[in-house]
Image: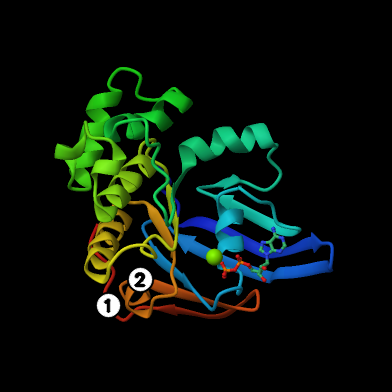
């Protein structure tokens, strides 16, 4: 786990997409430093660059210029193969539509990132059950995803994202498909994870949800329009 202060550094990052209609600048000169344990909301209108920024943090996409490092490692500059290996151990990703594999049980879904990365080979199922307890659904371990509610599926997806104990957890509109009560429960879960040394970055356009974050970064037309710390105190570690 990262012990430095700045867990994630984004420096002078721009992203230009080449399209048939010409170049499109999705991010312009974005510089951000995030601390380990920080719970950060990325907000802004549709099209402001939120998903683009998240995809650069996870190494799913590369900046046109600028540099990104996560937990002291420079992400930009890695080859595709290096990136894939790095991502498996360093980034947990949670999606709006959960993306659990329907033919695997919940426990098997959570063991999959361990299988793929060759981690925890002596006790993958035990670890999966422990992660499921952490997100409050250990009794669902042997069911298939279709048997779970949306909120339970998202909890399982969060457990899967934590499988290899990454320093960074990102989620792009993770509550976009949940009712408001379930959304706030899922957000409380993210908040409790951020207190454990993981940097949690959540994209949302829901104001209520952004309010519980330690810090809110607002994008507008690919620029950081504002970057504000919440008034509530940081959670004790
Ligand atoms: P948000 O997540 O804030 O809604 P995005 O980061 O998805 O916004 O997109 C920002 C802008 O970049 C949008 O105008 C979008 O159309 C454009 N964009 C995103 N991805 C691509 C791509 N692969 N090719 C071309 N344009 C893209
Ligand atoms: Mg988006």
**Does residue 40 sit above or below 229 in this rendering?**
above
Residue 181 in which image quadrant: bottom left
| Dots 2, 1 in contact, CB < 8 A | yes
> Which residue occupies the foreground of this view, 3 or 154?
154
Helix, strand or loop status at disc 1: loop
Residue labelled 1 has its Cβ within 8 Å of some atom of ligand 1: no
Residue 232: assigned label: 1
* Mark 1 residue crowding within 10 angstroms, few (<14) / some (14–19) / many (20+): few
Residue at horizontal 35 percent and vertical 71 percent from the top: 214
Label 2 to label 1: alpha-carbon separation: 7 Å
Give percent across and percent down for residue 198. Answer: 37, 51
Name the side, left or right, on which 40 lies relative to 65: left
Mark 2 surroundings: few (<14), some (14-19) or many (≥20) residues within 10 A: many
Q: Nearer the viewer, residue 188 or 152?
A: 152
Residue at the spot 55% in from the left edge and 58% down from the top edge: 54
Residue 214 is marked as: 2
């Amino acid at each position: 786990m990262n012990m430095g202060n700045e867990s994630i550094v984004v420096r002078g990052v721009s992203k230009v997409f080449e399209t048939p209609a010409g170049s499109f600048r999705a991010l312009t000169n974005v510089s951000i430093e995030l601390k380990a344990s920080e719970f950060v909301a990325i907000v802004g209108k549709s099209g402001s660059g939120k998903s683009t920024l998240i995809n650069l943090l996870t190494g799913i996409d590369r900046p046109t210029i600028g540099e990104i490092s996560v937990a002291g490692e420079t992400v930009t500059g890695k080859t595709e193969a290096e990136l894939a290996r790095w991502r498996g151990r360093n980034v947990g990703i949670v999606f709006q539509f959960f993306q659990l594999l329907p033919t695997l049980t919940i426990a098997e879904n959570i063991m999959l990132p361990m299988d793929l990365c060759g981690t925890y080979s002596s006790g993958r199922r035990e670890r999966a059950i422990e992660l499921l307890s952490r997100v409050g659904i250990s009794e669902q371990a042997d069911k298939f995803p279709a048997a779970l509610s949306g909120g339970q599926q998202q909890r399982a997806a969060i457990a899967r994202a934590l499988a290899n104990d990454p320093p960074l957890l990102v989620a792009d509109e993770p509550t976009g498909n949940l009712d408001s009560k379930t959304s706030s429960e899922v957000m409380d879960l993210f908040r409790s994870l951020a207190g454990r040394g993981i940097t949690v970055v959540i994209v949302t356009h829901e104001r209520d949800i952004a309010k519980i974050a330690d810090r809110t970064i607002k994008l507008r037309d690919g620029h950081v329009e504002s970057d504000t710390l919440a008034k509530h105190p940081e959670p004790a570690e």
